[in-house]
Amino acid sequence: MMHARGLFGRGEKPRRVMKYWLVNAALHLLVWSLLAAVVRGGEGNAVAAAVLIALSAAGLAGTFVLARFGYARGVQPGLLAWLQAWPVILSVAAAYAIVPEVRAALLPLPVVAVMFCSFGMTRPQGARVAVAVTLVLGLAMLALSLRNPAVFVPAHELFHFGILAGMLAATAFLTGEFQKLRARLHEQKEEMQLALGKISLIATLDELTDLPNRRHMKEIIANEVERNLSVGKSLCLVLIDIDFFKNINDSYGHNVGDQVLRAFADRAAAALRTSDVIARWGGEEFLLLLPATDEAAADLVLRRLREQVNGLRVDGLPDALTITFSAGMAWLTPGISVNEAITQADRAMYRSKQQGRNASRVFNAQVDGDVTPPAYAETTQLNLLASTPAPDLSDVAILVVEDDDLQREVMLVLLQELGARHPLFAHDGHSALVQLANAARPVQVVITDLNMPGMDGIEFIRQLGESRAAVSIVLMSAVNNTVLKGVEKVAQAHGLALLGVLPKPVRRRDLARVLAAFTAAPQPAPGKGVATFEQFSAEELQQALANREFEPFFQPKVSLQTGTIKGYEALARWRRPGLGIISPGSFIGVMEQSALIDELTYVMLDKSVAACSQWQSLGLDYGVSINVSVLTLSQPDCAQRVLRIVKDHGVDPSLVTIEMTESSTDATGLKTVLANLSRLRINGFGLSIDDYGTGYSSMDRLARIAFTELKIDQSFVAEAQTNASAMAIMQSSVSVAKVLHLVSVAEGVETKAQWDLVRGTGCELAQGYFISRPVEACAVPGMALEWLTRIQAGDVQTMDILIDG
């Protein structure tokens, strides 16, 4: 059997072809036996029987040749089975016609042949065989009736023929079913083998690096121990730990950390000999198995590995990483178990870390026996291949905002060590703003804490952003990374240059890294950029008014329900030649003290209404709000001048809103103020009480003045998420607005969280950097289009816009 199988070839299909031929041969032998029995009984023609046997034997031999060479030439097993069935079918038909006495015994044989062959046939092939057999045997019966009518009994023969036809029809149907079942079983077998293969891979390989995992490595070591130690060969185990890996995760994220592990694994595998095995042991640890290796050879392998992993490049990082590792070596000997050897390598590795890292060490029982691996993770600063140069801080003006005395002393020591000369210090945001305003030289870098009494770091950052201060920011805090990342986004939203974020306690290396980013960047030339906190004289301001250097910048007010822009607030800015844009904090106070505020108000009103008129001509139906000082409103001709300016530009007064701070309603000359406000309201102007909640006015004052809008101060918006009192004031302000039928506006909405919070209170409009920074009049159409695009795109990932349809 084995020899015959080899004639057809090896595999499942050759075995099937061989099986069909053996079935064919068995059927031929059965026919021959029946013929011989009949001849010996004296009932048959011996010569005819002998001729028939000889012919069928030749046919059987022919089927062997057909099967052998047909399969070799690519003929399908099903077709070969069909062709092999014909000799036995013809033999039975001939025997049936020549020796009628054996027809009852020979009649089922074609069915048996077809049944065996059907396992390799399709249903159409089985049907063709069934039809062919039926026709052949029908012709044999016809020949018998013509040759010897005496022995032919029509009813008897037709009965047998009918049974045969039915059996063959059933066989043709079952042929396809058997083949389908066989195909399904084969597919299930392949799927099971594939699933088992995947399970085997999962059970033995590390998912991230595709290296053997800890469990599989132990099996490999056990096999190598059995192979090597029995013949006196040594086995070296090396435990490797990537240095400073925690800093990679903390500084760049776990995605970058995963890329480093994969790259390290790939390079390590390329550096090893073919007999060596590396596995991921856990975290940033890898275990090497070095068969037949002494200490010198192991050192050579590790030296080659260090060269391979130096200078890894990772997607998302501009510089290559200098990756170092600490390694401990131990040898498996007949008296030491695998676990003991791994423990020894672990202790040697941690000893090399204690001695400075980036080194390899062989376990020494006398020195390393008492080493206990530390429970804490490394926090030493990550090194870059393109090493960061030490920052030159000798000419950099630095202000540190920190409320803790000890932390201020630490920062002073660190900055002096880095070369900073006379850094400034402030204990909270208020004192920091004073320092910025009174500094002998402009401050360039502000390092600020977040959790401070009085004005905290977030409010300080907001005011810096409002003032357009030309400073770079470094954030530091002991809060978790998630909070720091959120504050980082707030600083960026205010347009501040953020150098980095420092977790507390601040380390010298971290501080040097973020300050190096400042010294490495090109700094603006003197006289360029943005001037802030500078106090100007009344004469300078009067000259600027005469030159019409003051301009309105516009910030939109947006519906919290639909996202549509309802109007713009005009905010005063001074475009001073040579100094850029100056914020109002540098000139409003002096103007109020020197009676220049009235002229500024009318200049701002004139330019704002002119911009509104231009928007109308472009088809933009936007109103404008102008801040008017109570000192201006206390002038008897205020309302008349406002009406004249608006009419001169052809703007409907209903598109203009006069904003007045709540605290201003307690100023002297209240009767004149009320008269001017009433006259403006009668003429269709809107009236807004600004910074509601920060002054001392009463509900009675709100009821007496015909306000149309109530603006909630941004301080309550900023604190509402964490301060229950601020949240209660904001909610009550919205309720007051609803009771008095006023439009409620939340100022200072700077984040999506604040947008969602304010929207949840039922407030109608929002204003703040989350929507847009203040822009020049010519930029308003583009800004409006950008806002509309943000709404239509629904880009919540980058804009985080929440709009109800």
Image: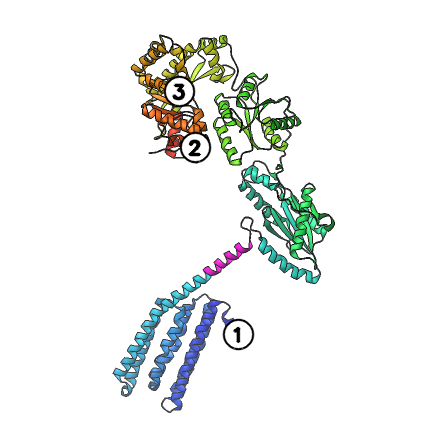
Q: Residues within 10 Å of mark 2 (few under 14, many from 20)?
A: few
Most common SS among magenta residues: helix
Q: Residues within 10 Å of mark 3 (few under 14, many from 20)?
A: many
Give the percent coordinates (x, y) of residue 470: 53, 22
* Residue that numbered label 1 is attached to: 3
Residue 46 appearing in the image: no
- The answer to whether marks 1 and 3 mark residues whose Cβ atoms lie closer than 8 Å is no
Which amino acid does the dot numbered 3 rest on?
Answer: Asp
In the depicted structure, whether residue 285 falls above or below residue 660: below
Q: In the image, is 548 to the left or to the right of 149?
A: right
Q: Tell me how far mark 1 sits from mark 3, CA to CA.
A: 103 Å
Q: Mark 3 or mark 2, which is nearer the start of the sequence?
A: 3
Q: Nearer the viewer, mark 1 or mark 3?
A: 3
Q: Mark 1 or mark 2, which is nearer the start of the sequence?
A: 1
Q: Is residue 200 magenta?
A: yes
In the depicted structure, whether residue 740 falls above or below residue 208: above
* Residue that numbered label 3 is attached to: 690
Q: On the rendered image, what quadrant is the C terminus found in?
A: top left
The residue segment tinted magenta is: 191-205
Q: Nearer the viewer, mark 2 or mark 3?
A: 3
Mark 3, secondary structure of its residue: strand
Camera-nearest residue between 310 and 142: 310
Residue 220 appearing in the image: yes
* Residue that numbered label 2 is attached to: 753
Camera-nearest residue between 283 and 78: 283
- The answer to whether marks 2 and 1 mark residues whose Cβ atoms lie closer than 8 Å is no
